[in-house]
Image (cartoon, helix red, strand yellow):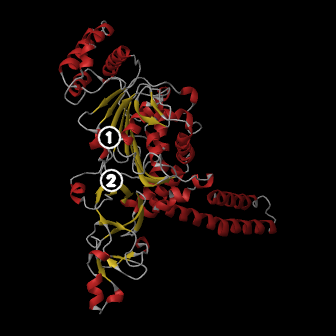
Amino acid sequence: VPLAAPAAGLSRGSCSPSLRGLAADFQTECGQHAPQWKVACVALTALPVTVAGALIRRRGRRAHRQQCGRAVEAAQRAAGQVGTPVVTVDGRETPAEAAEFDWAQQWYPALPLAMLEGNGPAPLRLLGRDLVLWRDGEGQWRCVDSACPHRLAPLSKGRVDQKGRLMCRYHGWCFRGDGMCTSVPMAKGDEEAEKRLLEVPRTRVASYPTKVKAGLLFVWPHLGSEEAAEGTEPFVGEGVGASPDWAVSDAPAGWRVWMEQTWDPSHASFLHEFTLPIYKPERALAMKPFELTDMGQKGILATHGGYMEGNMDIVAKRLFAPPCCNYSVYTYPDGREIVFNFYFVPTEPGKVRQITTSSFRMVSPSDKGASKAKGGAGQYAVSNILPKGRSIVQLKGASVNLLSKLASLVYSRSPYLARVKKGWEGLKIASGLVGDQDNVVLSYQAAVSLPEVHARQGNGAAMTPSERYGGRPSEYVLETRADAFVAIFDNWLAARSGGPFGLLEDCPKYTDAELLDRWTSHTSVSPDAQEALRFIAGVAVALESWAAPGSLLVLALCLACGAGRLAAVPAVLAACALAVAARLRR
């Protein structure tokens, strides 16, 4: 049903009367394809929409797309909305129920367990609040407010003692996993002070529920809803696995614009030019009609095709799973899949923590080259360049050269070098142009453009809803098919207080140096990257302090002995050592 058409009669388990009235149009449009239009008419007039979709899918993915396209265009032609994406709304949710959505009563990923060293403590910024993560004596990860109730010192600067308690670095107050204060060194022997301070609500720090899933530590940052937290599972996409590797980076831009960007695949051909050969403006193609489903409190589901040369024949499933996950699966006709599981955690206004993983499944090792003409090899490169941790899934029997076997042997024997390798790969990914391009545009959009549009409201300018998709008055002009993603997502947010920080965040304006700061965005939160950085610095020092001077000493000896030809060897070695050291320094 076109979004502009009445949708009051549409709900799960029922069929809109307007669809029944268009059965004749379906027959006219699909007269040359009798089996297809019969299935469509019977399903749409006699069965629930969900059952109709199941019946049609049995005829094959390609036939399903063609058939749905004809039915969609027929319905839209009757409504004067030819080519408009189809939007389904779960009619069981009322506006009042949508407004009750609590952004604090949700599971947010904090960090991968692999990035939490020892028992902590580790600082965490979430929803504009300072929290601290630590592991107690029972081996359970805890999350509490960071401020010590004594003198408000940061507990994240403390340590975990031998009894598994979180100890404040300022005066040694100790706290149990439930937040209760169990020890005050300056109160020992003072019964009156101990009675006032130990295990009383006055000195208790707020403690929040935690869960571990798929190698991630999740936090429920709300007090008084422990039963709801216990009965709810954090969202992790199918196929991610029990313990994948996760990549983490902190992006300097607002949460809303980052989530909008993940629902806007068509930007890649333009914004990400010069990163991969497949990304060029001249390769961009208009998106074909597709389907969007507003699932109420469960989020939004989109099924769409491609948006540039090389991926127009894909079937993409894109799911927004509240509060902050974008889970996408790109499936090609030959069965190859690219899977993305991206979390955009709202740490504070103007900053988002990205916790991501991706995978690429190939039918055969030859697909990497054989599908180059169709864009398959380019998409393979996309799965490599995007922030991810999980390795590319390859079939057994894929060719492995001698150097790869030797490297694998070294890494298996030396966990330290394996950790350095992992951190080095993370550093290379964090230095990619894709993230830089996103940050530059999105930070300006959040800190400058959106506030200016709202400021002009008082000077006679007025925001207007999309003429094609309706909904709230928008700061944007959203009229193309590709704009449907952002239009529907913004409407979903507006019904739920505009997101964790509202539709208009108070975002700082970052300088170019802050936007490209690798230490703040990635290395500071990745122990593996820090270890790799220390290793690189150590190698650079060794080259500068030992290799280059040693080679120059040998050069001097060769010249003193009259071995001019032999002196060329240490000279080249000294030059190479200094060049490599300079490269590592950069």
Q: Quadrant of residue 145?
A: bottom left
Dot 1 lies on which element? Answer: loop
Please, is residue 343 above or below residue 17 in the view?
Answer: below
- For the C terminus, give its image quadrant: bottom right
Characterize the local packing of mark 2: few (<14), some (14-19) or many (20 or more) Cα atoms within 10 angstroms. Answer: some
Q: Judge from the rendering whether residue 586 lies leftward or rightward of residue 315; answer left or right.
A: right
In the rendered image, residue 463, in percent from the top left (x then y), is placed at 49, 35
Q: Quadrant of residue 260?
A: top left
Number of numbered discs: 2
Question: In the displayed image of the protein, which residue is found farthest to the left?
Answer: 46
In the rendered image, residue 536, in percent from the top left (x then y), is placed at 57, 62
Q: Which residue is mark 2?
A: 243
Of tags 2 and 1, which is closer to the observer?
Answer: 1
Dot 2 lies on which element? Answer: loop
Please, is residue 348 above or below residue 264 in the view?
Answer: below
Compare residues 346 and 224 and report the one nearer the observer: 224
Residues marked 2 and 1 touching at CB (< 8 Å) = no
Compare residues 360 and 397 and report the one nearer the observer: 360
| Residue found at x 70% / y 65% | 551
Q: Judge from the rendering whether residue 6 lies leftward or rightward of residue 288; answer left or right.
A: left
Residue type of the residue flagged with mark 1: Gly
Compare residues 26 and 77 and report the one nearer the observer: 77
| Residue found at x 38% / y 29% | 304
Characterize the local packing of mark 1: few (<14), some (14-19) or many (20 or more) Cα atoms within 10 angstroms. Answer: some
Q: Which residue is mark 1?
A: 299
Residue type of the residue flagged with mark 2: Ser
Question: In the displayed image of the protein, which residue is found farthest to the bottom?
Answer: 189
Q: Is residue 414 visible?
A: no
In the rendered image, residue 364, in percent from the top left (x then y), is placed at 38, 34
- For the N terminus, give its image quadrant: top left
Q: Judge from the rendering whether residue 55 lies leftward or rightward of residue 32; answer left or right.
A: left
Q: Tell me the distance, in whole angstroms, between the alpha carbons under discs 2 and 1.
A: 25 Å
